Amino acid sequence: MRKVGILITASMALAGAAAAGTMDAFIANGVIVEQGGEAHETSFEDGRYTSSDNTSGTYAFEEGTLCLTSDGSDQARCFALPEGKASGDSFAVALPDGSKINVTIK
């Protein structure tokens, strides 16, 4: 299943500087995304993300929102990140199609 649901994406729409701490933790540690019984690790570096499910692309973060654009696509998926999350924290994320993923910051 090639969902870059990474990432993501939080069910809580929270903003600003506190969510930047969550993004800092994403970049510093990477995340594990669980969906449909599968788990994939995703890392973030230099404006790019790479996942163990063989997906990659670019990311942008602004005002508490993470946007992912898969390689070969011109459409970004954007998601609000919860504030104050750090290494070891997990949280549920609602995807635009109504499904949910679990994100754990490594």
Image (tube, helix red, strand yellow):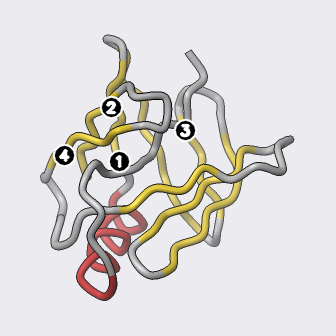
Q: Which numbered disc flags the more N-terminal residue, 3 or 1? A: 1
Q: For residue 51, which numbered disc appears in the image?
A: 3
Q: For residue 31, which numbered disc appears in the image?
A: 1
Q: Which numbered disc flags the more N-terminal residue, 4 or 2? A: 4
Report the Cα–Cα distance between label 3 and label 1: 9 Å
Report the Cα–Cα distance between label 3 and label 4: 18 Å
Residue 65, given in percent of the width and then of the height, sits at 45, 68
Asked if disc 3 and disc 2 are in contact, CB closer than 8 Å, the reply is: no
The one nearer the camera, 58 or 41, is 58
Residue at mark 2: 101
Disc number lying in front (1 or 4)? 4
Residue 50, given in percent of the width and then of the height, sits at 60, 46
Q: For residue 91, which numbered disc appears in the image?
A: 4
Q: Amino acid at mark 4?
A: Phe
Using the image, determine if residue 36 lies above or below residue 23: above
Displayed quadrant of residue 20: bottom left
Relative horizontal placement of residue 42, taking residue 68 as reference (left or right):
left
Residue 102 can be seen, yes or no: yes
Displayed quadrant of residue 53: top right
Report the Cα–Cα distance between label 1 and label 2: 12 Å
Q: Which numbered disc flags the more N-terminal residue, 1 or 2? A: 1
Relative horizontal placement of residue 65, taking residue 92 as reference (left or right):
right
Residue 106 can be seen, yes or no: no
Disc number lying in front (3 or 4)? 4
Q: Amino acid at mark 1?
A: Val
Residue at the bottom extreme? 17
